[in-house]
């Protein structure tokens, strides 16, 4: 007999064994709801058949599993039936009955029927009965009942049977929600159980102990640091403790505690169980996200991340898919904040690209895209291409983002990366996905000069066959701006012209725009483009036809005389990338204008510039956020008057900025006040823990400043009345006080505002109206304590209120790379430069100090100072009062003999403003 | 103490329910329809990862889902997204081991349905309201059978025999 025949025989024999498979199988527990419920009447029979009842209970549970809903009457009947089953002595039946009661929603009014039976089971000799009874009770217990059986449960927690102890502790965890005061009495027993011999009891007890202590900060610290010192915890309990230690570390920065807990976490990296090792590594990674000081570096709270990484790295090669997944998922998260640290695992991540579990492969891929080295880029891209068809759209978007960053990091790889992006444009995908790719390509073209032509050609190819008009117009407008500076603009004209013939009106109009822009910038192509535009002079669509005709006339220079002036102006508008005013603001102002005085002509000059509008909005948002914080602090959140104000829309010009203007209307009319330029961030004028907390918000106007004192009374038993601001002006030649507005009554925890309106007395030396000043201020009020009708007058000092140059500035964040182009677009002739020597000890503190005092936003990550270098360049951007865009370049150097030296250069369209800003540093 | 487990789901290979347990107050599982939708996702996603003889893992929405397929049955353990995967793996291994014991190593839909009562009880013993309650298969099995005292070492010989039988028959089928 050869091997083949043996195998055949065995196969036949095995098949014989499984023959029953071929008969139709009927699930013994399936049944109609009505039939099954009818059958449960057997529960009430005088002689219970335990086996039959078990079978019936399983049938009912299967019904519930299949999604059958029981009406409340059916539930009640079933429940009453089930209570009869407690008479049986069959253990199996008892166990099934417990399960049924846990699986149905017993009505609160009927629960009492089983409680006595369950309490009896709780004092049974059998551990199984006791534990199960507690587990059922923990589901149906109400607080009053909990108090009754308090003693039982308390003893159960320290029972020698782990089953009973765990059941009681979990009952405690459940009760924390409904009757925490009962559970708090068990704290000693729970603490004892944490050192139980049973691993599960340790785990549950630790969980409950944390719940008991979590709201008491100091007690929690004590418990956590004590427990970290004791040995012999089960792996799962260890994981919980690691988690709690991590939470304490995240919340608190106490160096002694930090040291002890970090030592503990580090020791757990060498734990004997994989689970706890991983939890500790995970803790390191999570803390790496929080620890800003170590950001970018390889330390967490001063501890080296290497051991944690080594653990993850070893797990990457585990034979278990779950372990590989856990590790790569963690590394993926870490790569988002510290790609350099993760890159040391690259060697072990690369094999995962071909992992049989696709989820692991995709995670490895996106991680490598963040950490990958230049030499691997080609290989990575090849790998992704095989992935793209299988992964979800969300993930695709993430891949595009990663590829974009990769390309910015390794610009020399633009060819292969752009080709990848472009090939995805041709694949199936959502509009969102396509838009992301187009945005990525546009950004790359802007950022990487050598990639420009390749990128533009990719975009051109895409519009040849693009189903989204909005993307098409976007690309056309981009082409119009960019192609004139390429080596051969004519190459791109064909693509644009094709759109003129093949697309809908919207796209055609954009195409016409683009061609005209090219013609204006490249005179050599003008004649050809005019010929091309010819076809559109008779377009069906009014807009396209009108535009084309206008452009043609303009290009041919047919307009003369008055029209000629118009042409020059128009030419300017067309060639400029940005409008001089904010579109949102235009919309808002126009609406206000039509409502108020439709007969008068509208003046565009009244509309604030984009920057001014954005800064006003940002300032209002900052104030709203601060006010909302004050609101949520209040224990009884009532609507204080400030709240209504905070919700008001952002002001654009005086008529639509009614709030502040309306508040101070008695002191100054809205017309005299003018338009709100911006509001500064709220600044504390008292200690934040003081009895009365005052925040000052400076609302800046061209000729005035409105000081708003947001005052909060933190004393519960006091009311302040007739609150006034005592205000002293140091330099009356510069500043005049127009009037003050007090607060009538200031009850506990309801912030209200007092106002002081200041007028600028002269224009300042440079005509900028950026006067500076320092004022003394104090609260002046009548205190009335509870039950006291008269009260007494008192004052409360505040810090001086200063108006500095920074108050006339609003930080304006720029996109990466934007600073350079904006800096160059401003004239060097208008630059103000000065050199200073400052009192800073480090480059970092100098950079931060300068940023704060100028109140500008750092650009291109220049706020990150290389501490080892001797000099640093800080790039700052801000919007000066009146919507003036200001850029500063600060060279800071540390010199052993001269200290900290600064060369500050400032550019804006107003040389006087630049000068004033530079000199404000002195 | 937050829950480690969001759901345990036992489905057949067509996505039909054999047994399920959902925990916590997640909107994703709030009613039968929502649960069905979630199970469909589970089933579709896991089908793409062809079953090997090991616990596999994936993300479904915000949840971690560990699963082990065997013949025409898939057992899923669904955990919160930020849970320790290795901790869940320990529970998953325990559950699968118990299922093997219940069915005498014949993990088919049919044998699970035949031992449905034991399956329900076992699932009840390994978690309580989303908190892991037991990860030792011997203890879980003993508790679901209401047996007192310390767990015994099971029946090593029979267990070995059963697993050998399963191993041989699988090899034969895969070759034929």
Image (tube, helix red, strand yellow):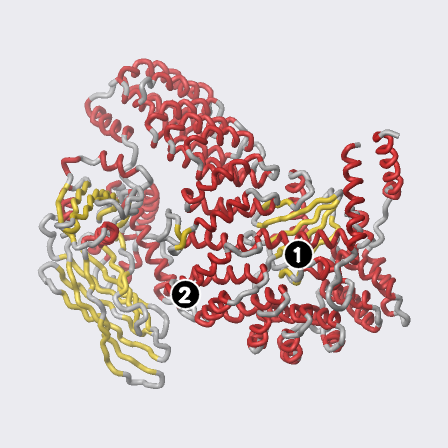
Find residue A438 and report its image quarter: top left
Distance between the alpha carbons at the discs numbered 1 and 2: 39 Å
In front of the other: A626 or A8:
A8
Residue A573 locus on image (x, y percent): 27, 31
Q: Is residue A400 above or below residue A891?
A: above
Pointer 2 residue: A257
Image quarter hosting the N terminus of chain A: top right
Q: Residue at x 79, y 58 (%)?
A: B117
Residue A494: mark? none
Q: In terms of secondary structure, where does tag 2 sit?
A: helix
How packed is label 1: few (under 14 Cα within 10 Å), some, or many (20 or more)?
A: some
Horizontal side of residue A4 vs A273, given as left or right: right
Find residue A342 and report its image quarter: top left
Pointer 1 residue: B22
In front of the other: A553 or A129:
A129
Residue B18 locus on image (x, y percent): 75, 51
Nearest-to-viewer mark from 1 and 2 = 2
Residue A571 locus on image (x, y percent): 26, 27
Find residue A637 and report its image quarter: bottom left
Q: Is residue A355 above or below residue A137?
A: above
Residue A669 locus on image (x, y percent): 22, 58
Q: Is residue A216 above or below residue B102?
A: below
Q: Residue at x 40, y 67 (%)?
A: A633
Horizontal side of residue A657 vs A94, given as left or right: left
């Amino acid at each position: 007999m050869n091997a083949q025949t043996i195998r055949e025989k065995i196969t036949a024999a095995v098949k014989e064994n499984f023959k029953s498979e071929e008969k139709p199988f009927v699930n013994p527990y399936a049944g109609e709801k009505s039939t099954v419920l009818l059958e449960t009447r057997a529960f009430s029979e005088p002689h219970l058949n335990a086996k039959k009842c078990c079978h019936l209970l399983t049938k009912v549970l299967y019904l519930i599993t299949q999604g059958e809903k029981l009406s409340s009457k059916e539930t009640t009947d079933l429940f009453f039936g089930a209570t009869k089953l407690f008479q049986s002595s069959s253990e199996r039946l008892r166990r099934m009955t417990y399960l049924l009661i846990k699986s149905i929603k017993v009505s609160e009014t009927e629960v009492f029927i089983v409680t006595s039976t369950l309490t009896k089971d709780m004092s049974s000799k059998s551990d199984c009965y006791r534990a199960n009874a507690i587990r059922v009770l923990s589901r149906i217990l109400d607080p009053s009942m909990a108090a009754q059986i308090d003693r039982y449960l308390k003893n159960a927690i320290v029972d020698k049977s782990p089953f009973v102890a765990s059941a009681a502790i979990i009952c405690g965890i459940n009760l924390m929600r409904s009757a925490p005061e009962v559970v708090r009495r068990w704290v000693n027993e729970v603490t004892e159980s944490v050192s139980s011999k049973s691993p599960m009891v340790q785990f549950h007890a630790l969980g409950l102990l944390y719940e008991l202590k979590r709201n008491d900060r100091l007690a929690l610290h004590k418990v956590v640091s004590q427990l970290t010192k004791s040995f012999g915890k089960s792996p799962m309990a260890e994981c919980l403790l690691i988690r709690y230690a991590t939470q304490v570390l995240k919340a608190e920065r106490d160096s002694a505690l930090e040291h002890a807990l970090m030592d503990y976490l580090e020791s757990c990296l060498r734990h004997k169980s994989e689970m706890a090792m991983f939890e500790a590594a995970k803790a390191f990674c999570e803390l790496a996200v929080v620890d800003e000081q170590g950001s970018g570096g390889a330390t967490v709270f001063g501890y080296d991340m290497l051991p944690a990484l080594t653990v993850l790295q070893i797990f990457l090669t585990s034979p278990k898919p779950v372990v590989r997944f856990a590790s790569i998922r963690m590394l993926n998260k870490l790569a988002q904040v510290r790609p350099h640290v993760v890159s040391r695992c690259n060697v072990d991540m690369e094999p995962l690209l071909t992992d049989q579990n696709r989820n692991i492969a995709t995670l490895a891929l996106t991680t490598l895209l963040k950490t990958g080295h230049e030499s691997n880029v080609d290989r990575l891209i090849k790998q992704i291409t095989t992935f793209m068809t299988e992964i979800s759209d969300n993930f695709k978007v993430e891949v595009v983002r990663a590829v974009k960053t990769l390309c910015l990091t390794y610009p020399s790889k633009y060819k292969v990366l752009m080709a990848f992006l472009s090939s995805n444009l041709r694949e199936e995908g959502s509009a969102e996905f396509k838009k992301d790719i187009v945005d990525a390509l546009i950004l790359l073209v802007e950022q990487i000069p050598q990639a420009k032509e390749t990128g533009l050609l990719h975009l051109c190819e895409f519009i040849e066959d693009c189903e989204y008009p909005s993307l098409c117009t976007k690309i056309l407008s981009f082409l119009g701006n960019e192609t004139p500076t390429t080596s051969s603009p004519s190459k791109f004209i064909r693509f644009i012209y094709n759109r003129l013939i093949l697309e809908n009106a919207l796209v055609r109009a954009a195409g016409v725009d683009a061609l005209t822009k090219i013609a204006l910038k490249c005179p050599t192509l003008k004649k050809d483009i005019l010929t091309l535009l010819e076809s559109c002079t008779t377009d069906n669509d009014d807009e396209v036809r009108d535009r084309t005709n206008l452009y043609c006339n303009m290009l041919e220079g047919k307009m003369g005389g008055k029209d000629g002036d118009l042409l020059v102006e128009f030419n300017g508008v067309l060639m400029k990338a940005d409008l001089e005013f904010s579109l949102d603001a235009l919309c808002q102002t126009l609406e206000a204008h039509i409502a108020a005085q439709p007969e008068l002509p509208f003046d565009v000059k009244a509309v604030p510039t984009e920057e001014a509008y954005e800064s006003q909005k940002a300032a209002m948002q900052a104030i709203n956020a601060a006010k909302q914080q004050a609101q949520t602090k209040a224990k009884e959140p009532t609507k204080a008057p400030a709240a209504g104000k905070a919700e008001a829309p952002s002001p654009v010009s005086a008529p639509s900025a009614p709030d502040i203007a309306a508040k101070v209307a008695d002191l100054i009319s809205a017309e005299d006040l003018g338009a709100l330029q911006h509001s500064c961030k709220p600044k504390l004028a008292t200690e934040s823990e003081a009895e009365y907390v005052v925040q000052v918000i400076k609302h800046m106007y061209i000729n005035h400043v409105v000081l708003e004192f947001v005052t909060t009374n933190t004393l519960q038993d006091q009311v302040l009345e007739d609150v006034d601001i005592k205000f002293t002006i140091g330099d009356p030649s510069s500043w005049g006080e127009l009037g003050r507005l007090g607060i009538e009554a200031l009850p506990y925890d309801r912030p209200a505002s007092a106002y002081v309106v200041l007028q600028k007395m002269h224009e300042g030396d440079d005509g900028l109206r950026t006067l500076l000043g320092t004022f003394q201020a104090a609260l002046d009020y009548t205190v009335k304590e509870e039950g006291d009708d008269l009260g007494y007058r008192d004052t409360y000092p505040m810090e001086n209120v200063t108006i500095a140059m920074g108050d006339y500035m609003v930080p304006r964040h720029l996109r990466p790379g934007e600073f350079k182009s904006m800096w160059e677009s401003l004239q060097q002739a208008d630059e103000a430069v000065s050199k200073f020597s400052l009192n800073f000890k480090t480059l970092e503190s100098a950079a931060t100090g300068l940023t704060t005092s100028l109140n500008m936003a750092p650009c291109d990550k220049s706020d990150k100072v290389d501490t080892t270098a001797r000099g640093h360049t800080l790039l700052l951007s801000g919007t000066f009062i009146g919507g003036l865009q200001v850029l500063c370049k600060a060279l800071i150097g540390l010199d052993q003999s001269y200290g900290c030296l600064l060369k500050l250069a400032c550019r804006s369209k107003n040389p006087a403003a630049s000068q004033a800003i530079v000199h404000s540093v002195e | 103490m937050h829950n480690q487990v969001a759901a345990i789901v036992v489905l057949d290979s067509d996505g039909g329910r054999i047994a399920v347990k959902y925990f916590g107050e997640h909107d994703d599982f709030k009613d039968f329809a929502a649960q069905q939708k979630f199970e469909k996702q589970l089933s579709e996603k896991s089908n793409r990862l062809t079953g090997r003889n090991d616990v596999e893992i994936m993300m479904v929405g915000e949840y971690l889902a560990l699963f082990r397929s065997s013949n025409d049955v898939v057992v899923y353990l669904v955990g919160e997204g930020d849970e320790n995967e290795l901790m869940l793996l320990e529970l998953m291994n325990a559950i699968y081991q118990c299922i093997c014991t219940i069915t005498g190593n014949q993990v088919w839909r049919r044998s699970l349905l035949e031992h449905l009562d034991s399956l329900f009880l076992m699932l009840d013993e390994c978690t309580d309201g989303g908190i892991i309650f037991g990860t030792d298969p011997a203890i879980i099995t003993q508790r679901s059978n209401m047996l007192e005292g310390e767990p015994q070492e099971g029946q090593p010989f029979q267990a070995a025999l059963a697993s050998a039988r399963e191993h041989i028959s699988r090899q034969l089928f895969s070759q034929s």
